[in-house]
Amino acid sequence: MQNLLKRAALIQRQADRTLLRQRQKVARDRTLQRIRETISKDQARSLLFRREQTSRREDWVQGQLAPRRDVGGEGDVYGALGTEFVQGAELKDGSERERRERGGEGGGTGGLVAGDRVVVVERGHRDVGRVGVLGNVRVGRGEGVVEGVNKADVAVPPWMLEVDANQKPYTPLSLPIPFSSLRLVAPLPHPETGIKRDVIINALHLRKRNIAQLRGLEPPERIIAGVSPAISIPYPEKAKTEEEDHDCDTLRIEVEETTWTPTLTEPPMPPSVIDELRGKYSKFRTRHDEAWLEGKREEDKMAEEKKRWEKLAMRSPGQEAGRREKGRRKRLRMRNLEVGETGRWEMRGEVVEVIGRVMERRLGQEEVRRRLAGVEIGEGTGVGGERWK
């Protein structure tokens, strides 16, 4: 039985180590992918800068003799960005610097969700001050795509042109914007007139007030940070999707029909159902049937008995004689003892009498009596606990 428990624990530890190695490998792959994306984007940006510097220099020096760059092999995608700029690099786990620069509160979206009206507040951005609806939210990359804002032409990869020959070599897309450059725009009433107007909210605080919000079943409440009394900002309404019924669908009345009522005298399910919910022959199983455990205990007892007999069979003649002598002495010692009134082992009465007769022959009857009575007859400690003189 112990071997079975040890085997299950060993297999569980091996599985945990395997899972840990897999997670570490996934983390390393994500790190390498993030480094590759960052290097590729930096190289593409640096190449664009160098080309623009060269073109500006040629246009200024050559004037009307400057070459046309919107023709030739790359003429169709002249001025278009590469696919490296479609999305930013994935945020590094635990990097506080990137969280502060790219993300909002706690490295997330800062309370922004898809469907919110946001405004670009980054100084120097070409679309600063423009308001749009937040579409795609990329929490892992700390950025979001605002519909109709920060649009640019992106060159279509050659493999996509081979799939669709009628597709243009470039397509206009809204490039992502970091959450740190976006602020929520919400209609709030004026404190004096009461007329609603758009207000830019600098920061949001997420408050969890009930069990469902703490467990993640419901989104937390959004309130404006630093404002008292608290002003709650509702989430955008989601479009309702109409579900179409089909002939193969199960009716709701059939689903809610009560077909079995459990009682205290019956198990909640047949015993065979448990084997369907768990692996009956799984190597990770730790709970077993009592009959099976009893059989394992019997096997352990038989194994112990077999070991004991094997150990007895391997004794030498000297060991066997010593074992017999030890048993004889033990039996003799137990024959001369009995349990007294105090519950401890004491000598039998006939044994005490034999010892007394022997002492009379050797020391004399009077001296033996005095010693047994606890009388002080010499130096040392007497039987009764008194001091001998």
Image: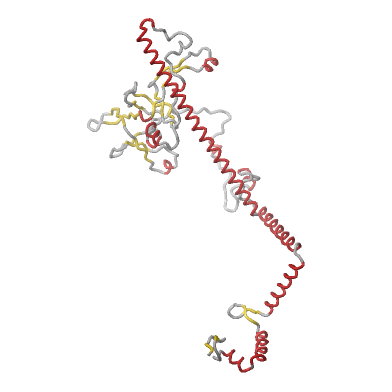
Asked if residue 204 is positioned above or below residue 342 in the image, the reply reads above
Q: Which is more toward the observer, 133 or 285? A: 285
Query: Measured from the top left, where is residue 262 in percent x and y?
Result: 57, 48
* Left or right: residue 51 compared with residue 349: left
As drawn, the residue found furthest toward the top would be: 65
At horizontal 45% and vertical 28% (from top left) the residue drawn is 89
Asked if residue 281 is positioned above or below residue 193 in the image, the reply reads below
On-image quarter of the N terminus: bottom right
* Left or right: residue 317 compared with residue 330: right
* Left or right: residue 316 compared with residue 339: right
Q: Quadrant of residue 114?
A: top left
Scheme of image coloration = secondary structure
Asked if residue 38 is positioned above or below residue 96 in the image, the reply reads above
Q: Which is more toward the observer, 246 or 226? A: 226
Q: Which is more toward the observer, 72 or 54? A: 54
Q: Quadrant of residue 358?
A: bottom right
* Left or right: residue 42 compared with residue 1: left
Q: Quadrant of residue 275?
A: top right
Q: Which is more toward the observer, 54 or 195? A: 54
Query: Measured from the top left, where is residue 260 in percent x and y?
Result: 58, 45
As drawn, the residue found furthest toward the bottom would be: 366
Query: Measured from the top left, where is residue 389 in percent x and y?
Result: 53, 90
Query: Measured from the top left, where is residue 109 in percent x and y?
Result: 39, 33
